Image (cartoon, rainbow, N blue to C red):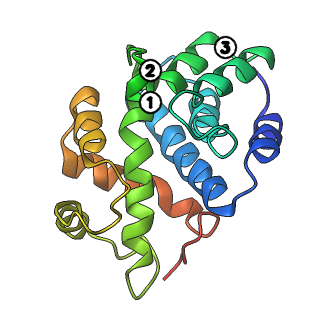
Amino acid sequence: MPTREEAWELLCEYTKGKSLRQHALAVEAAMRAAAARYGGTDADADEWGLTGMLHDFDYEMFPTMEEHPYKGANILCGRGYPDRVIRAIMGHATYTGVPRDTPMARALFATDELCGFLVACALVRPSKSLDDLEVSSVRKKLKDKAFARTVNREDIRQGVEELGVDLDEHVRFCIEALKPVQEQIGLKGGQ
């Protein structure tokens, strides 16, 4: 398994945009937390975290459904990433048909879209922070189809269903998981 430093270098090689890098850090943080919560005793927080960090690393260069995440999977294979990481990344894109048949794959799918949505929710708050973001506010924003319209609400719903958790519980969990890295992901922390 490559190191976190090697994974970050790979991400930066293929992803130049700040916002996509910040998204990678957000999903990494959520996945590290998810490893402890959903992975059981054999969970590897580093592996789960790197899976979260790299799930979209190829998207900026290969943004089409014909290319992403297929090109990335080939690159990861060539760089020595385990098959379980590559399968989880392939499974986060529903159109690949790769089943989310491991806790790591289900957690990635359940955190990906939600992390982006939580950042969007925090950015419209006066505090620009997750510190005062309430689950009820997130639920209200989820119903507003004009807000963060590129976020796939169906993927969020399906993700929590596949993970077997309550939406409110998962939103709260992800908010807490992102708080320690909120400055790195473009938010203000410590309010």
- Give me the disc on residue 82: 3
- Give me the disc on residue 93: 1
- In the rendered image, which quarter is residue 100 located in? top left
Q: Position of residue 22 (x, y in %)?
A: 62, 58
**Seen in the image, is 126 located left or right of residue 15?**
left
Label 1: how many Cα within 10 Å (few below 14, some 14–19, many 20+): many
**Seen in the image, is 8 located left or right of residue 85?**
right
Q: Amino acid at mark 3?
A: Pro
Q: Residue at x 25, y 64 (%)?
A: 138
Give the spatial CA distance, label 3 vs label 1.
18 Å
Q: Position of residue 33 (x, y in %)?
A: 48, 42
Quarter holding the N terminus is top right
Looking at the image, residue 137 lies above or below residue 175: below
Looking at the image, residue 16 lies above or below residue 124: above
Mark 3 vs mark 2: which is more N-terminal?
3
Q: Position of residue 38 (x, y in %)?
A: 38, 29
- In the rendered image, which quarter is residue 106 located in? top left
**Label 2 with label 1: CB-CB less than 8 Å:** yes
**Seen in the image, is 150 located left or right of residue 8?**
left
Can residue 41 be seen here? The reply is yes
The residue tagged with tag 2: helix, strand or loop?
helix
Q: Amino acid at mark 1?
A: Ala
- Residue annotated with mark 2: 96
- Give me the disc on residue 60: none
Q: Amino acid at mark 2?
A: Thr
Label 2: how many Cα within 10 Å (few below 14, some 14–19, many 20+): some
Q: Which is more toward the observer, 38 or 1?
A: 1
Of discs 3 and 2, which sits in the foreground? 2
